[in-house]
């Protein structure tokens, strides 16, 4: 595992070609994403270099009980440091929920290096953020007082997004954060938001938005706001799981376009570090 800003980070680096960094959602992990099988990573890796990682405190990566470590702007710094460690200059950054926020923060921090964005299920932001933050803070207290299992019982009692309602149990998340770190991870998320609107408006990199309908934790309002703010953006809204099944191909096509654009300048053609 490479040591990224003081923490050992678990990564998977597969395929060759233009690099695509992908971050998972809050309290998830690479293993959890594989269990859901929403994305076909092998298909993407046949055409591109796909780099995934467990965010600090998640999955097999290390972490400390420090809430500020898990703020989304700091996770963006982790992404940039990971790219540095792997010898990658320019890349497409993407992710789901927290991973999407991580990618956006990285694009703000190093705009020359992030040449494309894939933002799946963008999380609550701006006007909708405070209500979600309250839930995270309450969850942190619940874990500290009654233990992680009590929090998980509460999580399991919540209705799934309508798009998943026909498949009860199949998409029930299994948190991949230890009980010792769980409160800090939640508090870090509670103090996070997407970058300020004026900063997002300044992003010139092409972006692909992939929201679905009816999910209060990932409301359409966030993707609609990003659609207004980003200058070079396309969107595909999923109303059914069959729509979600097209997302791997849509991402692959988006990456093809960014790789072709990068190929106009040999200085941005990445090579796998040895």
Image (cartoon, grey):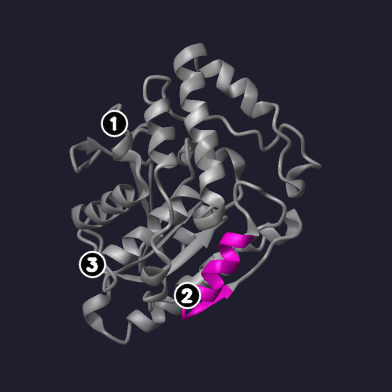
The quarter of the picture where the N terminus appears is top left
User: Residue 207's mark?
Assistant: none
Residue drawn 46% across the image and 46% down it:
24
Main secondary structure of the magenta stretch = helix
**Left-right relation of 68 to 95:** left
Residue drawn 56% across the image and 75% down it:
234
Q: As displayed, is residue 69 above or below residue 98?
A: above
Query: What's the distance in space between the residues labelled 2 and 1, CA to CA?
Result: 32 Å
Question: What is the count of numbered marks?
Answer: 3
Nearer-N-terminus badge (2/1)? 1
Segment colored magenta: 221-234
Q: Which residue is mark 3?
A: 89
Estimate the x, y position of residue 35 in percent, counting from the top left. Answer: 58, 38
Q: Badge 3: few (under 14), some or many (20 or more) residues near its Cα, within 10 Å?
A: some
Q: Badge 1: few (under 14), some or many (20 or more) residues near its Cα, within 10 Å?
A: some
Q: Which residue is mark 1?
A: 66
- Find numbered disc 1 in the image and state the secondary structure of the residue it sits on: loop
Q: Which residue is mark 2?
A: 230
- Find numbered disc 3 in the image and state the secondary structure of the residue it sits on: loop
Residue drawn 71% across the image and 45% down it:
161
Residue 223 versus residue 234: which sits nearer the camera? 223
Query: Does residue 232 show up magenta in the picture?
Result: yes
Query: Does residue 89 show up magenta in the picture?
Result: no
Between tags 2 and 3, which lies in front? 2
**Left-right relation of 257 to 262:** right
Query: What's the distance in space between the residues labelled 2 and 3, CA to CA?
Result: 23 Å
Nearer-N-terminus badge (3/1)? 1
Most extreme residue toward the top, as rendered?
Answer: 146
Asked if residue 74 shows in the view, the reply is yes
Q: As displayed, is residue 154 above or below residue 170?
A: above
Residue 264 versus residue 97: which sits nearer the camera? 97
Q: Are marks 2 and 3 in contact (CB under 8 Å)?
A: no
């Amino acid at each position: 595992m490479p040591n990224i800003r003081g923490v050992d980070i678990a990564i998977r680096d597969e395929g060759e070609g233009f690099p695509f960094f992908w971050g998972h959602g809050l309290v998830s992990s690479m293993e959890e994403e594989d269990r859901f099988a929403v994305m076909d990573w092998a298909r993407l890796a046949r055409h591109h270099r796909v780099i995934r990682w467990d965010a600090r405190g998640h999955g097999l990566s290390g972490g400390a009980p420090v809430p500020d470590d898990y703020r989304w702007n700091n996770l963006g710094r982790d992404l940039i440091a990971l790219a540095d460690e792997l010898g990658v200059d320019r890349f497409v950054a993407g992710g789901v929920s927290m991973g999407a926020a991580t990618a956006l923060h990285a694009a703000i921090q190093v705009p020359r290096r992030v040449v494309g964005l894939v933002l799946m299920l963008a999380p609550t932001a701006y006007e909708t953020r405070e209500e979600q933050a309250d839930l995270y803070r309450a969850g942190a207290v619940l874990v500290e007082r009654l233990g992680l299992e009590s929090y998980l019982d509460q999580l399991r009692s919540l209705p799934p997004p309508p798009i998943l309602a026909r498949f009860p149990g199949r998409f029930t998340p299994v948190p991949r954060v230890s009980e010792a770190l769980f409160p800090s991870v939640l508090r870090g998320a509670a103090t996070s938001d997407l970058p300020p609107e004026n900063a997002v408006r300044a992003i010139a990199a092409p972006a692909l938005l992939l929201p679905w309908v009816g999910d209060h934790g990932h409301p359409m309002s966030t993707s609609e706001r990003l659609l207004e703010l980003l200058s070079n953006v396309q969107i595909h809204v999923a109303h059914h799981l069959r729509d979600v099944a097209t997302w791997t191909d849509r991402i692959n096509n988006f990456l093809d376009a960014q790789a072709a654009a990068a190929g106009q300048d040999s200085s941005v053609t990445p090579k796998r570090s040895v």
